[in-house]
Image (cartoon, rainbow, N blue to C red):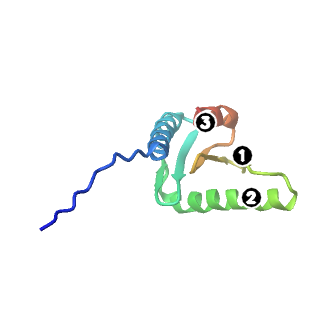
Amino acid sequence: MVRKTQTLQEIAFPVVVEESRLCDDLRANLAIINKREDVLGYILRNATTVTIDIKDSARIFEYAILSSQAMDSGKELSALFNLGPIENVVIQGENVKVLCTVVGEQTVAVFAEKDANHVEILKKVCQ
């Protein structure tokens, strides 16, 4: 009887490791940002998962729809006016503002009070 032998090859997945590290770093940055008094929470999502940390749990559904629509509308306007890829979208309302951005494969939405400095928040998200 003849036996077949197989050689095991080591397979490296550097992209997956980098993406995982990027996601971990991003989550850590968002946890720090979320401790600010003027930040109301955040939503972090990719194609397969979502992380939601909103201080007012009654508004999770509203904030999820707002963040999704903000990014979609930004992309549509960018295409309509031939602006190129969207880097971030800021929508400011009467009491709240939302900052939406894409970091790698992750879409981030940070909700804050109207007077919060979204430029500082964006810098921290993108660190």
Circle 1 Cα neighbour tier, 10 Å, few/some/many (<14 / 14–19 / ≥20): few
Q: CA distance from mark 3 to mark 1?
A: 11 Å
If you read the primary sequence from the N terminus, does the residue marked by circle 3 or circle 2 appear first? 2
Q: Which residue in the rendered view is the most extreme toward the right?
A: 81
Q: Nearer the viewer, residue 96 or 122?
A: 122
Say which residue appears at 48% left-offset and 36% top-offset. Answer: 25
Q: Is residue 30 above or below residue 108?
A: above
Q: Is residue 88 left or right of residue 61?
A: right
Residue 39: image tag: none
Residue highlighted by disc 2: 75
In contact (CB < 8 Å): disc 1 and disc 2: no
Residue at 61 percent of width and 36 percent of height: 126
- The amino acid type, in three-letter code, at marker 3 is Cys
Mark 2 falls on what kind of element? Answer: helix
**Residue 85 appears at what percent x and percent y?**
75, 51
Farthest-out residue, front: 1
In the rendered image, which quarter contains the N terminus? bottom left
What amino acid is found at the position of numbered circle 2 in the picture? Answer: Lys
Image coords of residue 98 (percent x, y): 65, 48
Local secondary structure at mark 3: loop
Distance, label 1 to label 2, CA atoms, is 10 Å
Marks 3/2: CA distance? 20 Å
Residue under pointer 1: 87
